[in-house]
Image: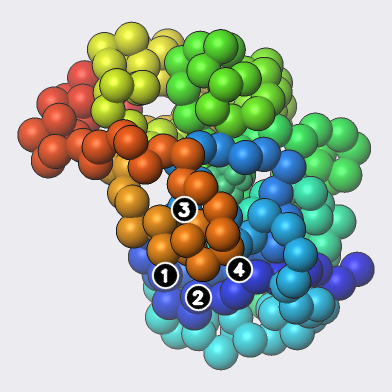
């Protein structure tokens, strides 16, 4: 099955271990206020086959080293689970490591099958409360938590990620929630905090959309360091 692809970054270092060939898929079921890729939400995109992408990725294999490989990000990769499964199968056939960067908000048999060929998941846990999830993401917190439980069952190494937004989740409560999850689910072997940034505002402007989180600040380096020290993994 072909995928609808927004773009490809051939040598990425921010989306998973090592150097990675990052495939950004088009389409997302959520509308996070902090989203820095609103241009992946809907419309457009280019149709590409799993074999075509795996072939392209293979050209960069020498850069991957022992940790790198292919990451599918978005948009939301789980909406194109069958395509991702075929792509990851094709990657494994070429000896390439596979990683998913996801909000964990889609479940079902196709997603379960995809996880069986996924070497690592980067799971965004965006806020510590259901009320925040419903207000600022567009789904209940149960969804990513059920997904996390599935990752644990399937023993998929998982990195939790959280974009830190001052006044919303730059709190001891939010770090405690991440620590609790890490304690509860042994598959979590790392937690990454990322500073909220506003460079995506130009994308919203170009699309004629309001950037809902324009009013929030970027966290300081001190805040990021302080929060990072509260984490246990
Ligand atoms: S899940 Fe990701 S791509 Fe979708 S709206 Fe949220 S931040 Fe944007």
Residue 30 found in image quarter = top right
The answer to whether mark 2 and mark 4 are in CB contact below 8 A is: no
Report helix, strand or loop for mark 2.
Answer: strand
Quote the CA–CA distance across marks 1 and 2. 6 Å
* Residue carrying label 3: 36
In which quadrant of the rendered image does the C terminus lie?
A: top left
Q: Nearer the viewer, residue 148 or 45?
A: 45
Tell me which numbered mark, 2 or 4, is placed earlier along the sequence.
2
Percent position (x, y) of residue 162? Answer: 40, 34
Viewer-side label of 1, 3? 3
The answer to whether mark 1 and mark 4 are in CB contact below 8 A is: no
* Residue carrying label 4: 23
Characterize the local packing of mark 2: few (<14), some (14-19) or many (20 or more) Cα atoms within 10 angstroms: few
Characterize the local packing of mark 4: few (<14), some (14-19) or many (20 or more) Cα atoms within 10 angstroms: many
Quote the CA–CA distance across marks 2 and 4. 7 Å
- Residue 36 visible in the shown view: yes
Tell me which numbered mark, 1 or 3, is placed earlier along the sequence.
1
Looking at the rendered structure, which numbered label has been put on residue 9? 2
* Residue carrying label 1: 12
């Amino acid at each position: 099955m072909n995928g609808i692809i927004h773009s490809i970054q051939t040598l990425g270092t921010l989306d998973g271990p090592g150097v990675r060939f990052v495939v950004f898929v088009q389409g997302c079921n959520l509308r996070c206020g902090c989203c820095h890729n609103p241009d992946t939400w809907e419309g457009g995109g280019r149709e590409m086959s799993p074999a075509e992408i795996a072939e392209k990725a293979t050209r960069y294999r020498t850069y991957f080293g022992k940790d790198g490989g292919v990451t599918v990000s978005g948009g939301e990769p789980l909406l194109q689970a069958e395509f991702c499964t075929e792509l990851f199968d094709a990657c494994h056939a070429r000896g390439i490591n596979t990683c998913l960067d996801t909000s964990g908000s889609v479940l079902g048999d196709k997603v379960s099958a995809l996880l069986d060929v996924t070497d690592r998941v980067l799971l965004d846990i965006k806020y510590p409360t259901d009320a925040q999830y419903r207000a600022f993401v567009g789904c209940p917190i149960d969804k990513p938590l059920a997904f996390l439980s599935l990752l644990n069952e399937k023993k998929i190494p998982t990195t939790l990620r959280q974009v830190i937004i001052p006044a919303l989740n730059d709190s001891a409560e939010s770090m405690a929630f991440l620590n609790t999850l890490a304690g509860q689910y042994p598959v979590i072997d790392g937690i990454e905090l990322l500073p909220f940034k506003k460079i995506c505002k130009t994308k919203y402007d170009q699309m004629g959309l309001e950037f809902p989180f324009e009013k929030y600040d970027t966290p300081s380096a001190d805040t990021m360091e302080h929060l990072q020290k509260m984490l246990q993994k």
